[in-house]
Image (tube, rainbow, N blue to C red):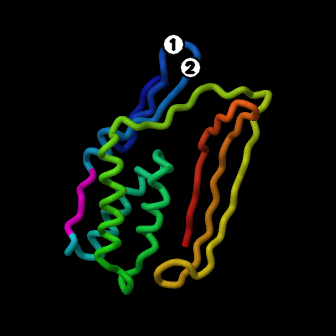
Amino acid sequence: MDEMEIICVQAITSRRLPRTFRFDQMAYVASLLLLTTGVSYHRCTSVRAAAAWVGHMRPHLGCTIIRAAQVSKATYETRHVQALNKAMKAAQSSPSLALHYSPPNRTTLQLRAFPDASFATNDDQSSELGFINLLVEDGRGRVHFVMFFSRM
Protein backbone atom coordinates (compact mmCIF):
# COMPACT_ATOMS: atom_id res chain seq x y z
CA MET A 1 0.00 0.00 0.00
CA ASP A 2 1.67 3.22 -1.15
CA GLU A 3 -0.81 5.72 0.27
CA MET A 4 -3.61 5.59 2.80
CA GLU A 5 -5.52 8.00 4.99
CA ILE A 6 -6.96 7.39 8.45
CA ILE A 7 -8.69 10.17 10.39
CA CYS A 8 -7.06 12.89 8.23
CA VAL A 9 -3.56 11.42 8.67
CA GLN A 10 -1.91 10.26 5.47
CA ALA A 11 0.77 7.58 5.29
CA ILE A 12 2.73 8.18 2.09
CA THR A 13 5.44 5.92 0.63
CA SER A 14 8.03 7.42 -1.72
CA ARG A 15 8.08 6.03 -5.24
CA ARG A 16 11.86 6.19 -5.66
CA LEU A 17 14.67 4.28 -3.96
CA PRO A 18 15.41 4.11 -1.15
CA ARG A 19 11.76 3.53 -0.28
CA THR A 20 10.83 5.80 2.62
CA PHE A 21 7.52 6.72 4.10
CA ARG A 22 6.12 9.65 6.03
CA PHE A 23 3.06 10.57 8.03
CA ASP A 24 1.30 13.77 7.00
CA GLN A 25 -1.21 15.49 9.29
CA MET A 26 -1.78 18.72 7.37
CA ALA A 27 -5.55 18.27 6.99
CA TYR A 28 -5.96 17.13 10.59
CA VAL A 29 -3.92 20.01 12.03
CA ALA A 30 -5.87 22.52 9.93
CA SER A 31 -9.13 21.22 11.41
CA LEU A 32 -8.10 21.87 15.04
CA LEU A 33 -10.01 24.72 16.64
CA LEU A 34 -8.46 26.98 19.24
CA LEU A 35 -10.39 27.40 22.48
CA THR A 36 -11.63 30.62 24.03
CA THR A 37 -10.44 31.28 27.58
CA GLY A 38 -13.91 30.86 29.09
CA VAL A 39 -14.54 27.42 27.60
CA SER A 40 -16.03 24.72 29.83
CA TYR A 41 -13.95 21.89 31.26
CA HIS A 42 -15.92 19.32 29.21
CA ARG A 43 -15.32 21.18 25.94
CA CYS A 44 -11.63 21.51 26.77
CA THR A 45 -11.30 17.75 27.39
CA SER A 46 -12.99 17.06 24.06
CA VAL A 47 -10.59 19.30 22.14
CA ARG A 48 -7.67 17.95 24.14
CA ALA A 49 -8.58 14.42 23.04
CA ALA A 50 -8.64 15.54 19.40
CA ALA A 51 -5.25 17.23 19.83
CA ALA A 52 -3.79 14.01 21.26
CA TRP A 53 -3.58 12.60 17.72
CA VAL A 54 -1.18 15.43 16.85
CA GLY A 55 1.17 14.43 19.68
CA HIS A 56 1.54 10.91 18.32
CA MET A 57 3.04 12.12 15.07
CA ARG A 58 4.79 15.18 16.50
CA PRO A 59 6.70 14.09 19.60
CA HIS A 60 7.88 17.64 20.28
CA LEU A 61 4.24 18.56 21.06
CA GLY A 62 3.39 15.28 22.79
CA CYS A 63 4.61 16.42 26.22
CA THR A 64 2.50 19.61 26.19
CA ILE A 65 -0.61 17.75 25.09
CA ILE A 66 -0.08 15.05 27.72
CA ARG A 67 0.34 17.75 30.38
CA ALA A 68 -3.00 19.18 29.28
CA ALA A 69 -4.55 15.78 30.03
CA GLN A 70 -3.34 15.94 33.64
CA VAL A 71 -5.93 18.48 34.71
CA SER A 72 -9.10 17.47 36.54
CA LYS A 73 -12.34 19.41 36.79
CA ALA A 74 -11.30 20.61 40.26
CA THR A 75 -7.91 21.95 39.08
CA TYR A 76 -9.04 23.30 35.68
CA GLU A 77 -7.85 26.88 35.05
CA THR A 78 -7.39 29.31 32.15
CA ARG A 79 -3.67 28.45 31.98
CA HIS A 80 -4.58 24.92 30.87
CA VAL A 81 -6.56 26.28 27.91
CA GLN A 82 -3.67 28.62 27.05
CA ALA A 83 -1.15 25.74 27.10
CA LEU A 84 -3.35 23.59 24.86
CA ASN A 85 -3.89 26.48 22.45
CA LYS A 86 -0.14 27.10 22.35
CA ALA A 87 0.50 23.49 21.29
CA MET A 88 -2.19 23.64 18.60
CA LYS A 89 -0.81 26.98 17.30
CA ALA A 90 2.67 25.44 17.12
CA ALA A 91 1.26 22.56 15.05
CA GLN A 92 -0.64 24.95 12.78
CA SER A 93 2.41 27.20 12.27
CA SER A 94 4.28 24.29 10.65
CA PRO A 95 1.53 22.25 8.95
CA SER A 96 3.88 20.44 6.57
CA LEU A 97 6.07 19.10 9.39
CA ALA A 98 5.91 15.31 9.26
CA LEU A 99 7.75 12.27 10.51
CA HIS A 100 9.91 10.72 7.78
CA TYR A 101 11.10 7.14 8.02
CA SER A 102 14.01 5.96 5.89
CA PRO A 103 15.30 2.39 5.73
CA PRO A 104 17.48 1.67 8.77
CA ASN A 105 20.89 0.05 8.73
CA ARG A 106 19.89 -3.33 10.16
CA THR A 107 23.41 -4.33 11.18
CA THR A 108 23.69 -1.52 13.76
CA LEU A 109 20.04 -1.14 14.71
CA GLN A 110 19.21 -1.20 18.43
CA LEU A 111 15.85 -0.99 20.20
CA ARG A 112 16.00 1.36 23.17
CA ALA A 113 13.24 1.81 25.71
CA PHE A 114 13.17 4.52 28.34
CA PRO A 115 10.67 4.24 31.22
CA ASP A 116 9.82 7.12 33.52
CA ALA A 117 7.69 7.72 36.57
CA SER A 118 6.71 10.94 38.29
CA PHE A 119 5.04 10.51 41.65
CA ALA A 120 2.50 13.12 42.82
CA THR A 121 3.83 15.75 40.39
CA ASN A 122 0.61 16.54 38.51
CA ASP A 123 -1.58 19.50 39.39
CA ASP A 124 -3.99 17.23 41.28
CA GLN A 125 -1.11 15.38 43.05
CA SER A 126 -1.64 12.25 40.95
CA SER A 127 1.27 10.27 39.53
CA GLU A 128 2.24 9.50 35.97
CA LEU A 129 3.97 6.54 34.34
CA GLY A 130 5.28 6.43 30.81
CA PHE A 131 7.79 5.12 28.32
CA ILE A 132 9.26 5.83 24.91
CA ASN A 133 10.61 3.27 22.43
CA LEU A 134 13.20 4.22 19.82
CA LEU A 135 15.16 2.42 17.11
CA VAL A 136 18.71 3.78 17.17
CA GLU A 137 21.37 3.35 14.48
CA ASP A 138 24.82 3.24 16.07
CA GLY A 139 27.40 5.50 14.53
CA ARG A 140 24.97 7.41 12.31
CA GLY A 141 23.17 9.47 14.94
CA ARG A 142 19.79 8.52 13.50
CA VAL A 143 16.90 7.78 15.81
CA HIS A 144 13.60 6.33 14.62
CA PHE A 145 10.70 7.17 16.91
CA VAL A 146 8.55 4.07 17.46
CA MET A 147 6.02 4.98 20.15
CA PHE A 148 5.46 6.58 23.51
CA PHE A 149 2.88 6.12 26.21
CA SER A 150 1.91 8.18 29.20
CA ARG A 151 -0.67 7.29 31.82
CA MET A 152 -1.83 8.98 34.96
Residue at 44% of width from left, 28% of height from top?
12
Q: In this view, does 98 lie to the left or right of 144?
A: left
Residue 129 vertical placement versus 127 (above, below): above
Q: Let me know if residue 24 is in the magenta part.
A: no
Residue at 26% of width from left, 70% of height from top?
43
Residue 109 vertical placement versus 89 (above, below): above
**On-image quarter of the C terminus:** bottom right
Badge 2 vs badge 1, beta-carbon distance below 8 Å: yes
Three-letter code for the amino acid on which mark 1 is drawn: Arg
Q: Is residue 48 left or right of residue 149?
A: left
Residue 132 vertical placement versus 102 (above, below): below
Residue 108 vertical placement versus 88 (above, below): above
Q: Distance between the residues labelled 2 and 1?
A: 6 Å
Q: What stretch of residues is rendered in magenta?
A: 32-36
Residue 7 is situated, as x and y percent measured from the top left of the image, at 36, 44
Residue at 64% of width from left, 59% of height from top?
131
